Image (tube, rainbow, N blue to C red):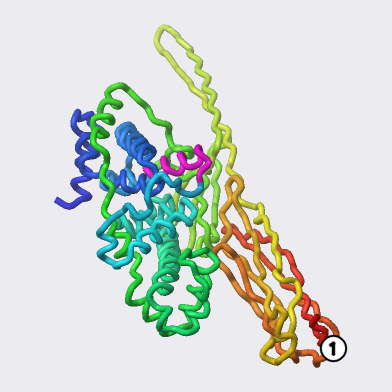
Amino acid sequence: MNRGASDTALVDRLVAGDADGLAAVYDRYADRIHDFCRRMLRNDADAADATHDTFLLAARKASGLRDRSKLRPWLYAIARSRCLAMLRDQKRTTPTDDLDPTADGAALDAAVGDRDVAALVAAASAGLDERDRAALELHLRHDLDGAALGEALGVSATHARKIAQRVRDRLERSMTALVVARRGSSDCGELGLLLTGWDGALTPKLRKRVARHVDACPICDDVRRRHVTPAALLGAIPLAPAPSGLRERIVSSRGAGVVPTDPPGGWRGDGFPTPAGNAFSGAALAVAATVVVASFGAGVGVGVVTADDDEPLLVAVPATTTSTTSTTSTTSTTSTSTTTSTTSTSTTTIPPDTVPPRLSATADPTEIWPDADFGICPQRDHTSQIVADARDDGPGSTGVASVRFRWLGPEGPMEVDDLEAPYEATVGPYPTTTTHEFPGGDEEIPVEVTAVDGAGNQSTTTVVVTLRRSFDCL
C-alpha cells in the first residue's frame, strides 16, 4: 500500500472516531513532527507542547481535510503554524540557547570530520527568518518538495520551489565560508590575506566576504564542491524523537476534551491552516498576482488568484473579522408551516503590504584618498565601507528582499545588489586620475542606497564619500 492510500485510511479512522486512530497517526509521524518543532523552537519543552497541539488539532479537524491522502503535509502545515504562533507569542525571532548547536550528532562529525560544521548548520539555519527556517527544514531535512512543500508552507508549488532554492543557496553559502576558511586558506594566498588575524569566529561580514571570494576563485570553489553538501549535512543529523510519555499525554488530553488554540489565520476550505502574515523574504517571492473578485450578496466575495505559471486558485476573500446575524421568522396556518432565514455577512479584508522598508546608511570612513599603489598618501584610507540598515518587520510585512548600492566608480557607474544582511558595498580605491585630471579639487561621490521589500515597496537614501584630490596627506 502506498503512503497516500495508507494515510487516507488513517484519516478515515480519525474521522470515524476510532479509539486507536490518533495513536496510529502519532506512531507514524510523531518523531518527524517533533524533530521539526524542536529545530524550529530550539527548546525541548516547547517542541513537546507544539507536537502535542499538532496532533490534537489533527484529531479535531480531520473531517475538514478535503484530500485525505495529504495527511503528511497537512500535519507539517499545522506544526509550522503552531511553531510560528509560539515564536510570535514569545517575541522570539531567533532560537534560544537552550540546546547545544553541536548536540545534533556524531553522525555529522563523521560526515564532514569537523564538529564546527555541525555548529555552522545550526547557526546558518538560526540566522534565517523563522518562515525561511521552516522551509529549509521541511525541504532539506524532511524531504518535502513541489506541491507537498507548498501545501505545508501555505504557498503554491511554484513559490515553494523558489523558496526552497533560495534557502538552500543561503545555507550553502554560509557553510561554504567556514569550510573553505578552515580547509582552503593554505592553498589560496588571497584567501589567506582575507583571513589575516582571523580568530576562528565567523561573523556575518566575514562570511559574506569569504563567500564572495569563493565565487571568483577556482581554487576555493573546488574546496566548496568537494566538502559542502547542505542536503547531506542536514540529513546526517539524527532525528530528535518524541519524548517518552508524549503519546499518552496526547491521548489523555483528547479524552479530557482539551482543545488547543486554532491557527491565527483559521482554516482554509481544503482543511489546511490559513497562513497568517505568510511573508517570505527574498526577491524571488515578489510575485505579481491577479485577483478577480465576484460579489455574491452582501459582503460575500470569491477571488480567483493566479501567479506565475500556477493554475488559478479559487479562494475566499481574506478576512480578519466576520460578523453574522441571523433572523428567523415563522408563519403558520392549519395546513402549512414556512420558515425563512436571512444571513448577512460583513468582511474586513487584510490590506496588502504598502509600507516601504525602514532604511539608513553610513559610510566608514567618509573621506578617502587616491590609491596608495600610486604612491599618493599611502597612510590614508583608500576605500570606504557603505553599510545599510534595512528593516521591514511591521504587521503584514513581506521582509527585505534586496538592498542596491549605486555610485560612480573609477571606470564608470557601479551597482551592487546585496540580498542578505549585513547589507554592504565597498567604494574605492580610485587611481590618481579618473574622469577628472589629478591634481584637482576634492570630489564628492554620492552613493545611492535603495531597499526593496517582497511586495516591491522601496526606500532610498544617499550617503556621500569625499575623494580628497590633493597632496596634503597630513
Asked if residue 413 can be seen in this view, the reply is: yes
Indicate the amino acid at tag 1: Gly
Q: Is residue 81 magenta?
A: yes
The local crowd at label 1, few if under 14, some if 14 to 19, many if 20 or more residues have their Cα within 10 Å, is few
Quadrant for the C terminus, please: bottom right
Q: Residue at x 46, y 83 (%)?
A: 217
Residue nearer the viewer, 408 or 399: 408
For the point 68% across and 59% down, which residue is it? Answer: 359
Query: Looking at the image, which residue is at 47% across and 42% down?
Result: 87
Q: Which residue in the structure is indicated by mark 1?
A: 440
Horizontal and vertical percent position of residue 145:
33, 59
Residue toward you, 242 or 344 = 242
Query: Does residue 376 sit above or below 454 in this rendering?
Result: below
Against 167, is 258 above or below? above
Mark yes or no: residue 272 visible: no
Q: Where are the magenta residues, as a range?
A: 79-92
Residue that protrudes farthest toward the left in the picture: 1
> Compared with residue 12, is residue 294 higher up or lower down, i.e. above or below?
below
On the image, the x and y values in percent for residue 196 come to 52, 76
Regarding mark 1 in the picture, which secondary structure is present there?
A: loop
Looking at the image, which residue sits at the far top? 334
Residue 180, by quadrant, is bottom left
- Does the magenta portion include 415? no
